[in-house]
C-alpha cells in the first residue's frame, strides 16, 4: 500500500474515477473511490482520509449537499471541490461553504495536474495549521510553567519577608529604648507592605499585575489596626478605582501609602484626639493614576525639621522617583494633602 496521502475521490463518472486513481497513484497518492455523495460521506465517516475531492454534478446527493455533510464530520479533512469550466459562481459558493480549494474539470492528465496542485496546497495548509496549533500549545504549556514558577518565587519571597518581619518584631519587643522600638516597628510595617504584594501575586490568577483596590484595602486595614486605639482613634478611609499595576509600581505605592498614612496617624492630631486620614487612588486619565493622602490635622510648618528620623520622608521621595514622579503638597489644604501622579 502506498504511504502517500490518503485521498477520497467522489464522482459518479466511472471512467474518470478509475483514471484519477491511476494517475494520482503514479504520483504517490493512496486513492479511494466513491461513486456517489452518500457513499463518500459514509466512507469518510468510517475511515481516515487526508483529503477529499468532490464533484459538483452528481445524482441524488449533489456536490454542495455532500460538501456540507463532509464538513459536519468530526475532524473533517479539507475538501477540494470539482466544477465545470463555466461555473465560477459555483466555485465561489463552494469556497464560502468551506471548501479548501476548487478545480475546474478538464480532459486527460491536465485535470490530474490541477488536482495534484490543489491537493498539495490544501495539505500544506493543514500542516501549517497543525504546526501553528502545536506551537500555540507549547507556548501555553511554557506560559503555565512560567506562571507556576513565578507564583512559587513570590510565595517564597513572601514567606522570607514574613520571617524577616517576625525577626524584626521580636527584636523590637526586646529593646528597652522606646525610640529604637518605634524605629523597628516602622521597619516591620514597611516589610509587610512589600510582603503583601508578593502574597497577592502567588494567590492570584494574574502573576504580572496587582489589583490595587484590593491591595490598598488590605494595607489600609493593617494600618488601621496598628494605629487606631481607644486612646488615639484614627479612621482611615480608602477610595480606589479598580486599576491593575505592575508589581514594582505596586510596591512603590504601597511604601508611599504606608509612610504617608503612618506619619498622619502619628503627627497630624494631638494625643487623645480622634482624627481621620483619607486615601484616594484613581485613574487620572487613560494612561495615568493619581494617589492622594490627606488629613485635617495640624499641617506642615514651612522650614520645620522633620519629626522622627526623617527616613520616612526620604523613602517617600525615593519611591516617587522610582515611579518617575514626585510628591506635591497642597499648602492651601487645612492639614496635610500629599498627591502623586504617575503613568500606569
Image (cartoon, grey):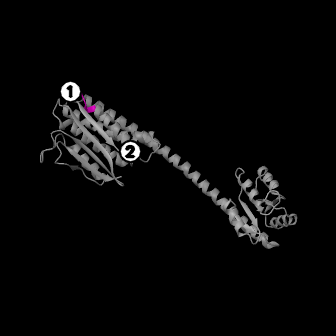
Q: Where does label 1 land, which residue? A: 231
Q: Earlier in the sequence, mark 2 or mark 1?
A: 1
**Residue 146, percent from left and from top:** 50, 47
**Residue 243, percent from left and from top:** 38, 47
Q: Quadrant of the N terminus?
A: bottom right
Q: Is residue 229 magenta?
A: yes
Q: Which quadrant of the view contains residue 13?
A: bottom right
Q: Which quadrant of the view contains residue 294?
A: top left
Q: Which residues are magenta?
A: 226-231
* Label annotation for residue 293: none
Q: Which residue is painted at 16% across and 48% down in the image? A: 332
Spatial CA span between label 2 and label 1: 34 Å
Outermost residue on the top side: it is: 230
**Front one among 145 and 22:** 22
Q: Do the numbered discs 2 and 1 sit on residues whose CB atoms are within 8 Å?
A: no
Magenta span: helix, strand or loop, mainly? Answer: loop
Q: Nearer the viewer, mark 2 or mark 1?
A: 2
* Label annotation for residue 242: 2
With 106 as the anchor, is 148 left or right in this view? left
**Front one among 218 and 251:** 218
Amino acid at each position: 500500500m502506498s504511504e502517500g496521502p490518503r485521498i477520497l475521490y467522489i464522482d459518479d463518472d466511472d471512467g474518470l474515477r478509475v483514471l484519477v486513481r491511476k494517475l494520482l497513484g503514479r504520483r504517490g497518492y493512496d486513492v479511494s473511490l466513491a461513486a456517489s455523495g452518500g457513499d463518500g460521506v459514509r466512507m469518510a465517516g468510517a475511515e481516515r482520509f487526508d483529503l477529499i475531492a468532490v464533484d459538483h454534478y452528481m445524482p441524488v446527493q449533489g456536490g454542495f449537499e455532500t460538501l456540507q455533510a463532509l464538513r459536519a464530520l468530526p475532524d473533517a479533512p479539507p475538501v477540494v471541490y470539482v466544477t465545470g469550466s463555466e461555473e465560477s459562481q459555483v466555485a465561489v459558493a463552494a469556497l464560502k461553504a468551506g471548501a479548501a480549494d476548487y478545480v475546474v474539470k478538464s480532459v486527460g492528465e491536465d485535470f490530474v495536474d490541477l488536482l495534484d496542485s490543489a491537493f498539495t496546497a490544501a495539505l500544506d495548509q493543514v500542516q501549517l495549521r497543525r504546526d501553528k496549533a502545536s506551537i500555540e500549545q507549547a507556548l501555553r504549556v511554557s506560559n503555565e510553567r512560567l506562571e507556576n514558577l513565578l507564583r512559587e518565587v513570590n510565595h517564597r519571597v513572601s514567606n522570607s519577608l514574613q520571617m524577616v518581619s517576625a525577626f524584626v518584631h521580636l527584636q523590637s519587643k526586646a529593646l528597652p529604648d522606646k525610640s529604637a522600638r518605634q524605629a523597628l516597628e516602622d521597619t516591620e510595617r514597611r516589610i509587610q507592605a512589600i510582603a503583601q504584594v508578593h502574597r497577592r501575586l502567588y494567590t492570584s490568577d494574574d502573576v504580572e499585575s496587582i489589583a490595587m483596590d484590593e491591595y490598598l484595602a488590605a494595607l489600609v486595614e493593617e494600618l488601621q489596626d496598628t494605629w487606631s486605639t481607644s486612646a488615639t482613634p484614627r479612621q482611615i478611609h480608602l477610595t480606589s478605582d479598580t486599576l491593575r499595576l505592575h508589581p514594582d509600581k505596586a510596591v512603590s505605592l504601597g511604601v508611599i501609602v504606608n509612610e504617608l498614612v503612618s506619619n498622619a496617624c502619628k503627627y497630624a492630631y494631638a494625643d487623645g484626639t480622634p482624627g481621620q486620614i483619607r486615601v484616594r487612588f484613581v485613574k487620572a486619565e487613560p494612561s495615568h493614576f493619581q494617589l492622594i493622602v490627606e488629613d485635617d490635622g495640624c499641617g506642615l510648618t514651612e522650614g520645620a525639621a522633620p519629626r522622627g528620623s526623617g527616613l520616612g520622608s526620604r523613602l517617600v521621595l525615593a519611591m516617587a522617583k522610582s515611579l518617575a514622579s514626585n510628591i506635591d503638597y497642597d499648602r492651601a489644604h487645612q492639614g496635610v494633602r500629599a498627591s502623586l501622579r504617575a503613568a500606569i
